[in-house]
Image (cartoon, grey):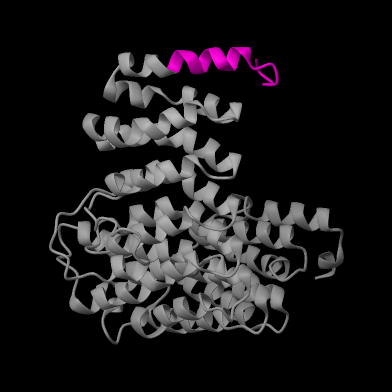
Amino acid sequence: TEGVDDEDEVLLALANSLGKMVSLVGGGSHAHSLLPPLELLLSVEENTVRDAASESAQKISEELPDATLQNQYAAMLTRLATKEWFTARISSAGLIAKVYPRLTSTQQEEHVQLFAQLCRDDTPMVRRVAAQHLGTMLENVVRAVGRKSLEEEGVVTTLMIPLYEEMASNEQPDSVRLQTTENCVAFGRVMGGIVLSDTEGPLTEHELVLIQRLLPLIVATIDDRSWRVRWTAAAKFANVIKSYNPIPGAMDALIPAYEKLLQDPEAEVRTAATFNLALVAQGCEAKVLPPIGHGNEEEVIDNKSYTGERVTSAERLVKRVTSLTEDDSEHVRAALAMVATELAPILGKDDTITHLVPPILLLLRDAASEVRLNLISSLESLNKVIGVDLLSQSLLPAILDLAQDGKWRYA
């Protein structure tokens, strides 16, 4: 206890060392003896010490026998989650989420309620850390309880999804809402895994209802008042597409949302979204609704009566490339130059020549040398699809321009 008042560097070294001492105290059956000092370190004010203590606690929990974990370790988590000082509650959030599957059913009910309390804690810093682990908690709940957790009276429906909605609300600070995208990715992995499983069977009507409750949370991040939240959504949107790709109908909501990110008012957001252009197109295997002129987004998303021909996401997104070549931000255009050619293998030769080559030629003539260099450095994908003859007609003049550009720092 006296050591907790020591210098932070000493506490950090101690926190790191405790996780490596399991073999020194006699193995997993005696590792519970390391928990008392660890509990103290999990409550200190310094973030780096708590983080190191959390890592050590996780290592020790993996070595503990089930009986010991369900006794001493679970009791420690309960104490941390209910302590008056908020730093202890911060530490408990991640540890509860990770250890959940190994608890008894009674303890699982108790600890998921404790986790919910942390998500609704009065201290924003506690809510932020709880939000960071909400996706992990949901995945472990479904892993431990099974699909019955997704039923109408299951814990996911009655507790976890409401937590998702609360943590994504505008009443939360930016630091909490920043976690919405990653948490929704975790939910998508769960539902997508059910779709892809050979043994689980198709999604039930209620599971589809849950998906319809979560999709608007993702779409809402696109219009969030904080550019940091929108940037996070843009940077992680390829993961969103990958996780929701197996789910029927999800892409009709997500691809239009991604297009809005490409048109965001902030250049940083547009740049992050543009970097993901090829990955989004590759990750979306389902065909989507074609863009309806310049109509509003709701018309595209909710047009369930559409009976015409659908298009691939690449065919839809390539129509955004031309407008991106005219973006005011050099960073957006440089990002586009790095990834645009990766659309070619998805589009095929004819669509590449028709829709992708013209904007690529514009990028080759861009005023910024970095844009031209990025494009020339990424032409291999395009070359494999349409051949070198068509490329060389425009490529050689661009290279000569680079060589003659005296202001270009690599010339």
Q: Nearer the viewer, residue 109 or 384?
A: 384
Decide if residue 191 is on the left or right side of residue 307: right
Decide if residue 191 is on the left or right side of residue 8: left
Q: Is residue 32 visible?
A: yes
Decide if residue 329 is on the left or right side of residue 349: right
Q: Which quarter of the picture shows residue 127?
A: bottom right
Question: Count the marks: how many?
Answer: 0
Q: The C terminus appears in which quarter of the rendering? A: top right
Q: Nearer the viewer, residue 247 or 329?
A: 329
Image x and y of residue 97, in percent? 49, 69
Residue 408 falls inside the magenta stretch = yes
* Residue 71 vertical position relative to residue 52 in the rendered view, above or below: below
Image x and y of residue 178, in percent? 56, 65
> Residue at the spot x=80%, y=71% of the render?
1
Span highlighted in magenta in the image: 395-411
Q: Nearer the viewer, residue 46 or 62?
A: 46
> Residue at the spot x=18%, y=74% of the render?
204
> Residue at the spot x=62%, y=55% of the render?
25
Image x and y of residue 61, in percent? 52, 62
Image x and y of residue 33, in percent? 63, 65
Q: Nearer the viewer, residue 400 or 7?
A: 400
Decide if residue 113 is on the left or right side of residue 147: right
Q: Which quarter of the picture shows residue 403?
A: top right
Residue 4 falls inside the magenta stretch = no
Q: Is residue 101 visible?
A: no
